Structures are given as structure tokens and as C-alpha cells.
Image: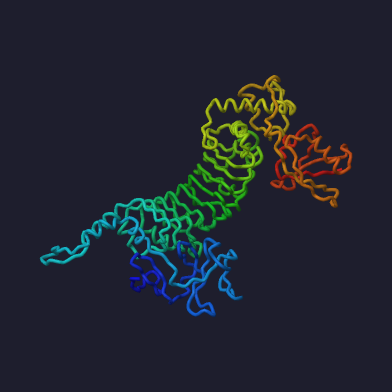
Amino acid sequence: MNGTARSGDYSLLDLIILDSGYIIMSDTLTLDVIGGRVKVNGEHATVRFVGVVPPVAGPWLGVEWDNPERGKHDGSHEGTVYFKCRHPTGGSFIRPKKVNFGIDFLTAVKNRYVLEDELEEDEKEQIVTIGNKPVETIGFDSVMKQQSQLSKLQEVSLRNCAVSHAGEKGGVAEACPNIRNVDLSKNLLSSWDEVIHIADQLRHLEFLNLSENKLKFPSGSAPLTGTFSALKVLVLNRTGITWAEVLRCAAGCPGLEELYLESNEIFISERPTDVLQTIKLLDLSSNQLIDENQLFLIAHLSRLEQLILSDIGISSIHFPDAGIGCKTSMFPSLQYLVVNDNQISQWSFFNELDKLPSLRALSCLRNPLTKDDKDTRTTRQLIIAKIGQLKTLNKCEILPEERLGAELDYQRAFGNEWKKAGGYQDPDKNRLSEEFLAAHPRYQFLCLKYGAPEDGELKRQPLMLKNQLLTLKIKYPHQLDQKVLEKQLPGSMTIQKVKGLLSRLLKVPVSDLLLSYESPEKPGREIELENDLKSLQFYSVENGDCLLVRW
């Protein structure tokens, strides 16, 4: 192994700098390495412990692996806890000489982008005249060529290159002043301070990807003002960043337009004020802690055009400031919404989306309501009919003739319900029930657009809607000794049939039963199911709601 011992950014450690630029550790250790990111045989880990582990002599590093299957224990050895891991097999003890602490940013750039073959040809002894004296040089042209190559770089991809720190102060700014796009994903950066040291030297930086780095934020609550003055796109997927840290970071990005925060267990705890006001795209995918109420905290980002909410577990949304047929003041500029891989199982979700004033494109793949392959076309038609301004659905353009067919079919499919709810050919005689208007808020508009449906045009509802099963809890407020039941009932089942089922189950006459329901989304608000001829779907009973039975 050829290398020389020297001190640099890790001045408190004995380090060995290899010819490749990679840093490994000698056997002299200090606690300063705790929290640092390391690479061992291609696997990434975080240092959690430095010291001796008896009875074996010599120093050890205790590491927590990113991949818990790589480890052997939870940080304990023979009954002594040396460090803690999130996973019972996430930890290992490693000898220091086996650990790679990474390289600086500029070395990684040179390793990746300098053409070594061309440089080697120039590494010959040359004589140049400086003043009146001849001077012998080695590789003079190669240095000039290297500097020329680096100064022209605008896009740099250093993914998985073991970058751990910025390097010598000013070195990056001098060598690579024109870099605009940087991918630093899956490296060994462990601190935002090092990111700032790099970014401060790249005054034209517009795109920065820091995904899969476990970054510790600077202590205190001061924002990173002005750090990323030219930045437009910031990618922080799988970094463990919190919402409070996002807001602090955003203060240093006055012109940020796109922010990617996938898989960070984010909980939106406060409304952005004076930050993120220029954001046009926000990706919150795979943050399972986010719910409907948290989304309201970002609902007034006035320039937000694209919102990606895939795989966050959302099942419902409601805009309380907008009544039936009205537009919400929330998300005023939102044009494209992605809600793939969620728990959407009720049509009321799409009724609410029609309240978004600027929505033009929607992607809602792989949800309970949309993943039944045999009913894909019917599902698509119903979504189109329910969201009037939609131009693209699941990345497929909605042509005028498709919208025409979808809206006419929707009119016919629910025409019988419309008539039973008080619908008339003469619009002046219409006295539609609130329940029907809540379930079908665009129906009256479609009647004005195409004319009210004639009796001969009416048809049965699509089988998918008729056969949709609702999982409901059944409780008995006046009989507390009765066990709470869970039943699956078709959404098309009438209240009369539900009472018949309960009558047989409880041995109570149908005439004595009174039914109502409440939603976990609106606890304490009870809605009576007073019309025996109406369906559960008519009353907007949804999956997970609770039927209340009294007699």
C-alpha cells in the first residue's frame, strides 16, 4: 500500500491518504468520527462508537449499517451496550483499517472527469524559460489541460463516489467555477456544513441531488440564508430530513422551483411562511405520516403547480371552504396531482378534486377504486365525468369525444337516482336532496349542458359501482354489552335491506330499528339513514365508516 500520513479536514485523526484520494484510518482514533459516514466493502454505514471492545485488544469502530441485514447485532457485545441501532441486526464492530471515510469533492471530480490517458502522455520532462532561466518541468502541459477540462464542466454526476467532504477551502471554486448541475446522491456526506462548503463555491449551482446521504443539520435554528442563491432544483430523497429542517434549508434557496422529499418519514408540522413561495413542484411520495390535515398547511403555496403524493396512505380529502359546485381557495395554481399507490376507495375523493380551480392532469393508478383491471374503462369514464376541467388522466389525454361520451354515460347511469332524489325535466321543479347533490355535485351542471335525461335513456349503474363492497363497523350505542361487528356490505344495498340483515342478526323487528352512521374523518357528526329506499352509497357511506344501530 503506497500512502503518506498527513492531516487535513480530519486534523484530530491519524489518517492515511491513498494515491486514489480515499481516506482510511490508522489505529489512532478519537470520538470526532462518531456520526461520520463510512463505506466498507461497498456497504454504507454510520459510525456510532469508537473504542476498545474487551476481551479483544485494539481499537474498534461500532457502525450501524444502512442495510440492517448486513449487521450481526444491535450494538451490544457480551451483555454490554456499546451503541444503539434501530434494527436488532443493524450493527457491527469493524477494525479501523477496513473502513473508508471517503474523498473530497474535487478529488472525486478529477477521478471521474479528467482524461488520465491524455495526461500521462504529457508527464515528461520539459524545459521552459521563465525570465532568462531555463526551468525543468514535469507534466506542465498536463496541469494546464486538466484545469481546462475542469473549468468547462457544467454537469457533474458523482453518485456513489464516496464523497465525504469539500476539501481545501476555495479549491472547488478555482477548479470548477462553471458547474451548474451536481448529483451527489449515495455518498458519505454526514453534515450540512460540508454541503454548504461545497455549494458556497459553486455560485451558478442550479440543480443539486443529495439523496441517500444521512445529513446532520447545523445546530441551532438559524436559516441557511443565501447559501444556494441560484438553486432551482433540490433532491433530498431518503436523507432523513425533517419538515423543520426543510423550512430552514428553503430559506437558503430563494429561487427554488422543484423540491423532492421522497421517503423521509416527514410530518408537516407548520405552514411555510416566507419560504417555498417560489416552489412549482413538490414531491412528498412515500411519507406515510402525512395526512389530509397536514396537506392544508401547504395549500396556500401560490405558485405550486405539481404535487406528488404517491404512496402516502391517503384515502380521502375535503376542502371545507368550498360548497357543492364551488371552487376552493386552496392550491390555487395546482395543475398536476399524482396520488398513485394510495388507499382511495370512494368516489367522494374525486368530487372534491373538482373543486381545485386549476387542476388539469391527474394520476391515480393502483388505488382500491382503480386497480380492478376489468373495470378500467368504466373507472376512467367516471373520473372524467366527475372532474370537469381535467385534460389528462393517468398520462393519457382526454379528447373532447371521450369527455362527451363519459359525461353522457354518467348522466344515464345515475338518472334513476336523480329522479328519485327530486329531479325533473323542468329545471324549475327540481328539488334535489342534499344527499344526491353531495354524491353527484356535477349532475345538475350536466343536465344544463346536455339537457335532462329522458326515461328511455336511463340505464342501470355500472356493475363496478353496484358491487363495490364497503367494510363497516356496526355499533349499538344503547346496548353497550353487544359486541362490535365488522361487515362487508355492497354500496348499492338499500337501508331497508340493511335493516333486514340486522333484524335477523339481532332478533329485533325491522320496524324497531333506527340507523345512522358516522365517519372517522368527522367524529361526533352523526347522519341519519332515514329513507329505507335509498342505498348506502346514496348517503355517501364510505369504507371504514361506522353504522350506529338503535332500537
> Based on the displayed image, in which of its 4 quarters is residue 73 positioned?
bottom right
Residue 102, percent from left and from top: 41, 64
Residue 71, percent from left and from top: 54, 65
Of 547 and 465, the residue lying toward us? 465
Q: According to the image, what is the colour scheme of the structure?
A: rainbow
Q: In percent of the image, x 38 and y 66: which residue is there?
A: 22
Q: Say how many tags the image has.
A: 0
Where, quadrant-wise, is the N terminus in this rendering? bottom left
Of 477 and 107, the residue lying toward us? 107
Question: In this orientation, does residue 384 appear?
Answer: yes
Residue 222, percent from left and from top: 48, 61
Please give left or right for residue 395 compared with residue 428 in the image.
left
Where, quadrant-wise, is the C terminus in this rendering? top right
Of 55 and 104, the residue lying toward us? 55
Please give left or right for residue 304 compared with residue 431 in the image.
left
Of 93 and 275, the residue lying toward us? 93
Q: In percent of the image, x 66 and y 39: which residue is there?
A: 346
Question: In this orientation, does residue 358 appear?
Answer: no
Q: In percent of the image, x 52 and y 39: which residue is there?
A: 335
Q: Furthest residue to the left? A: 132
**Figure check: 503 above or below 243:** above
Residue 538, percent from left and from top: 73, 34
Please give left or right for residue 187 compared with residue 297 in the image.
left
